[in-house]
Image (spheres, rainbow, N blue to C red):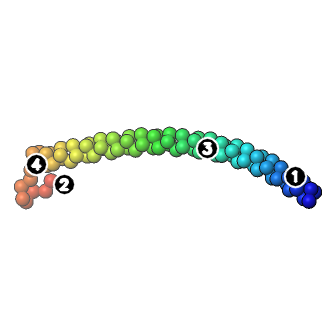
Amino acid sequence: MLECTLKKMAFLMITDEFIKVASEKAKKLVGLIKRKNSRKTILESSYMKSNYKSLRAEEKASKHYARGVRKLSKELEEMNETKYRAEPNECLYG
C-alpha cells in the first residue's frame, strides 16, 4: 500500500514537472508567435500605406491625363468650328 502511494506521488511529481516545462515552452512559443505576428502586421500596414500612396498618385495622374485629353478635345472642336469650316462640297483633307 505504501509502495503504491509512493509510486502515485512520484508519478504526480513527474507529471507536474512535465506540465510546468510544457507550459513554459508554450508561453515562449506564444511570445514568439506574437512577435512574428506584430512584425507581420507592421509590414502589412506599411505595405498598405505605400500601396495607398501609389494608388493616390495613379489616381492624380489619371485625373491630370483626363483633364489634358478633355482640353485637347475641346481645342480640336473649337479649331474645327472656327478655322476649318468647310462648305458642303468642300474637302478639308487633300
Q: Secondary structure at mark 4?
A: helix
Question: Residue 34, labelled with which disc?
Answer: 3
Question: Which type of secondary structure does the marked residue at label 1 adopt?
Answer: helix
Disc 1 and disc 4 in contact, CB within 8 angstroms: no
Residue on which disc 4 sits:
81
CA distance separating discs 1 and 4? 104 Å
Whether residue 91 is visible, yes or no, is: yes
Kind of residue indicated by mark 3: Lys
Tell me the mark number nearer the camera, choosing from 1 and 4: 1
Residue 93, given in percent of the width and then of the height, sits at: 18, 54
Tell me, yes or no, if residue 7 can be seen here: no
Residue at the limit of the structure toward the right, as seen here: 3
The local crowd at label 2, few if under 14, some if 14 to 19, many if 20 or more residues have their Cα within 10 Å, is: few
User: In front: mark 3 or mark 1?
Assistant: 1
Look at label 1 and name its amino acid.
Ala
- Quadrant in the picture for the C terminus: bottom left
Horizontal and vertical percent position of residue 39: 59, 41
State the CA–CA distance, disc 3 to disc 4.
Answer: 69 Å
The answer to whether the residue labelled 2 contacts the one labelled 3, judged by CB atoms less than 8 Å apart, is: no
- Position of 64 relative to 85 (above/below): above
Quadrant of residue 57 within the rendered picture: top left
Give left or right: position of 19 versus 54: right
The Cα–Cα distance between marks 1 and 2, rounded to whole angstroms, is: 108 Å
Q: Label 2 amino acid?
A: Gly
Q: Which residue is mark 1?
A: 10
